[in-house]
Image: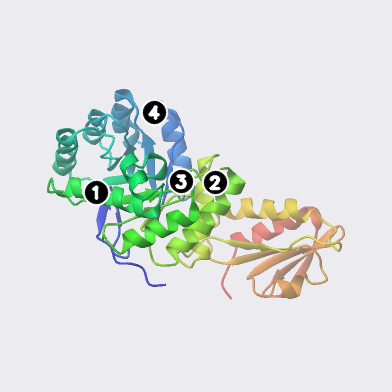
Amino acid sequence: MDRRKTKIIQIGNRFIGGGNTILIQSMTNTKTEDVKSTVDQIQALTAAGCEIIRCAVPTMEAARAIGKIKKEISIPLVADIHFDYKLAIAAIENGADKIRINPGNIGGKEKIKAVVNAARERGIPIRVGVNSGSLEKELVEKYHGVTAEGLVESALDKVHIIEELGYDNLVISIKSSDVMMCARAHEMISRRTSYPLHVGITEAGTLYSGNIKSAVGLAVILYQGIGDTIRVSLTGDPLEEIKSAKCILKTLGLRKGGVEVVSCPTCGRTQIDLIGLANQVEDMVQDIPLDIKVAVMGCVVNGPGEAKEADIGIAGGKGEGLLIKKGEIIRKVPEDKLLSALRQELINWKDA
């Protein structure tokens, strides 16, 4: 798909915009002041595929912790600031690679100017973030409710405040928990600015509902070539956000690499624990750096035929299963050895 060309922005050791790879972002849920716990979580997220991490900075202690955290991590760190401009400046001074602020709640123009000057001095970008839950009362009244038009106007107003201070090292995010409103807002703002866009469905929900809403919303937005970084916002373990984001990008053809697992729905012919097996396979392949498709089929009747489009697969039977490559049966394997046999094949994988 053709991606919208945006301004190139450097965040730490990564570049976004201008056709660069869409980067996956997440946010820590540790207390940023707790350096060890925060570093441990960031390192786990990095190993899973996170490429930019955002940390809440609600206190001066948290701002000072950024310097210590930065020494232990390898991906760019974004400091998330609300209300207190001094925290933004402190985060910048302690090495944040980007700051996320809403100029509307950070204070008057002089306070915004102080933040912009600190960012300018160190050459770090500012992410201007607007959420539907915090849309200004005047815009709610103007558009008779929270609307995509209001979100876009709010974001661009705040961008203009910073531009008037002579700074354009900016990223924009406009988020809503209303999927279609969020999609419409991104369509509108992409026609009115060339700044990179961070996209996501905010407050999407739990692992179940949040994944569905995020997949639908991000697919609509990304398929139009809109978006330079993404986050799948879930009420749960941040590691799940990374797994989902990788799958969404791969499904849309925006990322290569990583094993894709396909599996059949269960039916009356199934004689193994297909649900458990498919989940085990999905977990097992997370650390395997292959760009291939793996099929997990429930029976030996249709399994080989249904697995033809996969590079490799397994099909369960009664007490045993089949190992399949490109639709051809390789060998029979005892049921309790299926998973290990598949993993061994993947570890020793060679393209035919």
Q: Residue 202 carries which label?
A: 3
Q: Which residue is disc 2 drawn over?
A: 240
Q: Distance between the residues labelled 2 and 3?
A: 15 Å
Q: Is residue 311 left or right of residue 317?
A: left
* Residue 157 tag number: 1
**183 to 233, vertically: above or below:** below
Residue drawn at x 35%, y 54% is 149
Query: Would you say residue 222 is visible in this rendering?
Result: yes
Q: Earlier in the sequence, mark 1 or mark 4?
A: 4
Q: Earlier in the sequence, mark 3 or mark 1?
A: 1
Indicate which disc, 2 or 4, sits on the residue closer to the N terminus.
4
Q: Look at discs 3 and 1 and give the one toward the viewer.
A: 1
The numbered dot on residue 149 is: none
Along the horizontal axis of the image, is 54 left or right of 266?
Answer: left
Q: Which mark is residue 35?
A: 4
Q: Which amino acid does label 4 sit on?
A: Val
Q: Which of marks 3 and 4 is in front?
A: 3
- Pinpoint residue 146: horizontal percent, then vertical percent: 41, 47
Q: Which residue is drawn at 14% across and 39% down?
A: 117
Q: Which element is circle 2 on?
A: helix
Q: What element carries label 1?
A: helix
> Which of 192 and 286 lies nearest the eye of the viewer?
192
Amino acid type at circle 1 is Asp
In the image, is 255 to the left or to the right of 82? right
How far across and down, in percent of the image, does residue 79 sit?
A: 32, 37
In which quadrant is the C terminus drawn? bottom right
Q: What residue type is labelled 2?
A: Glu
Please say which color scheme the image uses: rainbow
Q: Is 7 rendered above or below residue 50?
A: below
Determine the CA span between mark 2 and mark 4: 22 Å
Q: Is residue 22 visible?
A: no
- Counting residues from the N terminus, which is met first, the one under dot 3 or under dot 4? 4
